[in-house]
Image: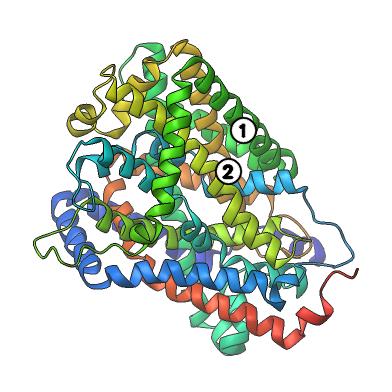
C-alpha cells in the first residue's frame, strides 16, 4: 500500500515551482491587460533603456555564446558522449535534426521568412533608401541573419549541462538548479536558491509558450479565413486554437517517438514539397537568383548585422538595432526550453554532434525557407501584384501573407499546404514545450522514464487556457516585451550552466572515460 501511494505521488506536478510561476504570469498579464496603455508605456520605457544601455552587450553576448559553442565542439569536451559510449544514439541523424528544426524554428519561420524583410525595407540600415531594391535585399538578408548561428547557439548552450546530468550522471531531476549543484552546492540547490532558479525557468517557458501560441495563431487563422472566405474573429481564433491544441495534446500523450518524431519528419517532407512546388509553378528563376543574392549580401554583411549599433546617429536608430536586441533577449528566455528538450533527445550523441547539429540544421532550413518564401513575396511586391509594403504599414504583417499566397498559381493548394505546415510546426513546438515542462515539474526519475502522461495533459491545458485568456483580454503584447526583458537574468543562468557542464566533465574526466572507442 505504501509503495502504491508513493508511486502515485511521484506522478503529480511539483507545485513548489509550478504554482508560483503560473500565478506570477497570470498576475502580471491581468494587471497589464487592465492597464494596457500604462503598462506598455512602462515596459517600452524599460526596454528602450535596456536597448540604449546594453545594446552592445546583447550583440557581444550572442557572439560569445557562439564562440563558446564552437570551442566546446572542437575541444576535448566535444568527444564526450551524452550517455553510454557503447550504445547507439537514441534517434537517427535525420530524425534528430528534424526534431531540432521543429523545435528551433517552428511556425515563426513561416511568417518571418515570408514577410519580415518588409520591416527593415521600410526602415533600412546602413543609410539605404527606404523601399529601394537594396533595402529590400538587406531586409531579406537580415531575416536570414536572425535565423543564423548566434540564435541557435543561444538555444543549445544550456543543453550540455542538462544532458550530462540526465544521461551521464543519471540525476532524477532534470532542472537548472540540479545542473548548477556542482557550482553552488547542496544547501543552495535544495533550498530557496534552487527554487528561485527553477521558478525563473518556469516563468520563461510558460510565458514563451503562451506568447508563441498567441502569435503563431494568426499565421494559421488569416490564411484559413482566406480559404473559407470569412473574417478573423476571436471565436474563430479560439476554435482553431482548440483544434490544434487537441492535436498536440494527443502528440504529447503518445510520447516523443510516436508524436514529435513522426510529425517533425513528416513536416520536413511537406516543407520540401512546398518549396519545390513554389519554385516550379511560381517565379522559380527569380527565387533562385534572389536567394543567391540574399546569401551573398548576408555573408558580405554578417559582421555588420552582428555588431551594428548605429552609434553615430544620436537622434535614434533604425529597425534592426532594437529588433536585434529584442530578438537575442527573447531567444535567451527560450534557451532554457530549447536546452532541456535538446538534452532529452540527445542521448547517445556527443557534445560536438549536439551543438553542431543545432547550429547547422535549423540554420540551413531557415535560410532556404527565407529564400523561397521571401523571394516569392518580394517578387509579388516588385511586380506590383501585391503592394506588400503598403499592406504591412496599414494592416500589419499577418494581413499580407494570405494576399501573397493568393497571388500564386493554384492558390488554394498553396494556402492549404501552407496552413498544414504551419499547424504541424506549431504542434511540434508546443508538443516539445509541453513535454519539457512536464519533464521539469514531475518528481518522476527522468533518467529512467518519460514524464507522466497525465502531467503532459495538465500542462497542455494550462498553456491553452493561459494563451486564450491573454488573447481575449489583450495581454500578449506586454507579456512578449516582458519575456524580452527577462532575458538579462536568463543570460546569467545560461553562462552558469555552461560553466557547470565544463566543471562536471572535468570532475569526471569525461573527455577521457566517457568517449567512443575506435
Q: Residues within 10 Å of mark 2 (few under 14, many from 20)?
A: many
Query: At x 24% / y 32%, what residue is drawn?
Result: 392
Report whether 145 appears left or right of 428: left
Could you tell me residue 456's position as x and y percent?
Answer: 61, 48
Could you tell me residue 100's position as x and y percent?
Answer: 61, 49
Q: Is residue 380 above or below residue 458?
A: above
Residue 343 visible: no
Instruction: Give the residue number, with chain letter if any, for mark 2.
Output: 102
Say whether disc 1 or disc 2 marks the residue closer to the N-terminus. Answer: 2
- Tag 1–tag 2 contact (CB < 8 Å): yes
Q: Is residue 267 above or below residue 350?
A: above
Could you tell me residue 425's position as x and y percent?
Answer: 54, 37
Instruction: Give the residue number, with chain letter if any, for mark 1.
Output: 267
Report whether 488 appears left or right of 35: right
Quick one: SS at disc 2? Answer: helix
Report whether 251 appears left or right of 27: right
Quarter of the figure with the N terminus: bottom right
Instruction: Using the image as rendered, state which of residue 26 and residue 324 is in the foreground.
Output: 324
Report whether 142 appears left or right of 86: left
Could you tell me residue 155's position as x and y percent?
Answer: 52, 60
Q: Is residue 493 above or below residue 3?
A: below
Instruction: Using the image as rendered, state which of residue 432 and residue 303 is in the foreground.
Output: 303
Query: At x 25% / y 57%, what residue is drawn?
Result: 322
Cα distance, mark 1 to mark 2? 8 Å
Query: At x 67% / y 60%, what residue is drawn?
Result: 354
Quarter of the figure with the C terminus: bottom right
Q: Quadrant of residue 239?
A: top left
Q: Quadrant of residue 85?
A: bottom right
Amino acid at each position: 500500500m505504501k509503495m502504491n501511494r508513493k508511486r502515485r505521488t511521484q506522478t503529480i506536478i511539483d507545485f513548489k515551482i509550478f504554482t508560483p510561476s503560473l500565478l506570477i504570469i497570470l498576475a502580471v498579464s491581468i494587471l497589464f491587460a487592465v492597464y494596457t496603455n500604462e503598462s506598455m508605456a512602462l515596459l517600452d520605457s524599460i526596454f528602450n533603456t535596456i536597448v540604449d544601455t546594453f545594446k552592445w552587450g546583447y550583440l557581444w553576448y550572442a557572439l560569445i555564446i557562439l564562440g563558446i559553442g564552437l570551442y566546446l565542439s572542437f575541444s576535448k569536451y566535444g568527444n564526450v558522449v551524452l550517455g553510454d559510449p557503447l550504445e547507439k544514439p537514441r534517434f537517427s541523424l535525420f530524425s534528430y535534426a528534424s526534431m531540432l528544426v521543429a523545435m528551433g524554428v517552428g511556425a515563426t519561420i513561416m511568417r518571418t521568412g515570408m514577410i519580415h524583410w518588409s520591416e527593415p525595407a521600410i526602415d533600412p540600415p546602413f543609410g539605404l533608401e527606404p523601399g529601394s531594391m537594396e533595402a529590400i535585399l538587406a531586409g531579406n538578408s537580415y531575416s536570414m541573419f536572425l535565423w543564423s548561428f548566434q540564435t541557435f547557439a543561444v538555444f543549445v548552450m544550456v543543453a550540455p549541462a542538462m544532458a550530462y546530468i540526465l544521461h551521464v550522471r543519471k540525476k532524477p531531476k532534470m532542472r537548472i538548479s540540479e545542473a548548477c549543484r556542482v557550482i553552488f552546492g547542496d544547501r543552495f540547490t535544495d533550498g530557496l536558491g534552487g527554487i528561485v532558479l527553477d521558478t525563473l525557468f518556469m516563468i520563461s517557458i510558460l510565458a514563451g509558450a503562451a506568447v508563441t501560441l498567441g502569435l503563431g495563431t494568426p499565421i494559421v487563422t488569416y490564411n484559413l479565413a482566406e480559404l473559407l472566405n470569412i473574417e478573423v474573429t476571436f471565436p474563430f481564433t479560439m476554435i482553431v486554437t482548440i483544434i490544434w491544441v487537441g492535436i498536440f495534446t494527443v502528440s504529447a500523450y503518445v510520447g516523443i517517438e510516436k508524436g514529435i518524431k513522426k510529425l517533425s519528419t513528416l513536416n520536413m517532407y511537406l516543407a520540401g514539397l512546398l518549396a519545390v512546388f513554389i519554385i516550379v509553378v511560381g517565379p522559380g528563376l527569380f527565387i533562385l537568383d534572389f536567394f543567391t543574392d540574399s546569401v551573398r549580401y548576408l555573408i558580405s554583411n554578417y559582421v555588420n548585422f552582428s555588431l551594428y549599433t548605429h552609434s553615430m546617429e544620436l537622434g535614434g536608430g533604425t529597425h534592426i538595432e532594437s529588433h536585434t536586441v529584442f530578438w537575442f533577449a527573447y531567444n535567451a528566455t527560450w534557451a532554457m526550453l530549447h536546452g532541456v528538450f535538446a538534452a532529452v533527445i540527445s542521448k547517445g550523441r556527443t557534445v560536438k554532434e549536439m551543438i553542431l547539429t543545432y547550429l547547422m540544421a535549423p540554420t540551413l532550413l531557415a535560410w532556404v525557407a527565407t529564400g523561397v518564401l521571401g523571394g516569392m513575396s518580394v517578387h509579388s511586391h516588385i511586380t506590383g501584384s501585391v503592394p506588400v509594403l503598403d499592406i504591412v504599414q496599414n494592416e500589419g504583417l499577418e494581413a499580407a501573407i494570405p494576399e501573397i499566397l493568393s497571388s500564386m498559381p493554384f492558390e488554394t493548394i498553396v494556402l492549404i499546404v501552407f496552413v498544414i505546415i504551419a499547424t504541424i510546426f506549431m504542434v511540434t513546438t508546443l508538443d516539445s514545450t509541453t513535454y519539457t515542462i512536464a519533464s521539469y515539474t514531475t518528481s518522476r526519475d527522468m533518467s529512467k522514464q518519460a514524464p507522466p502522461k497525465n502531467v503532459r495533459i495538465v500542462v497542455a491545458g494550462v498553456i491553452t487556457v493561459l494563451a486564450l485568456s491573454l488573447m481575449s483580454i489583450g495581454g500578449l503584447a506586454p507579456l512578449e516585451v516582458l519575456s524580452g526583458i527577462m532575458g538579462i537574468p536568463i543570460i546569467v543562468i545560461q553562462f552558469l550552466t555552461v560553466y557547470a557542464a565544463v566543471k562536471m566533465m572535468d570532475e569526471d574526466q569525461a573527455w577521457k572515460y566517457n568517449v567512443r572507442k575506435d
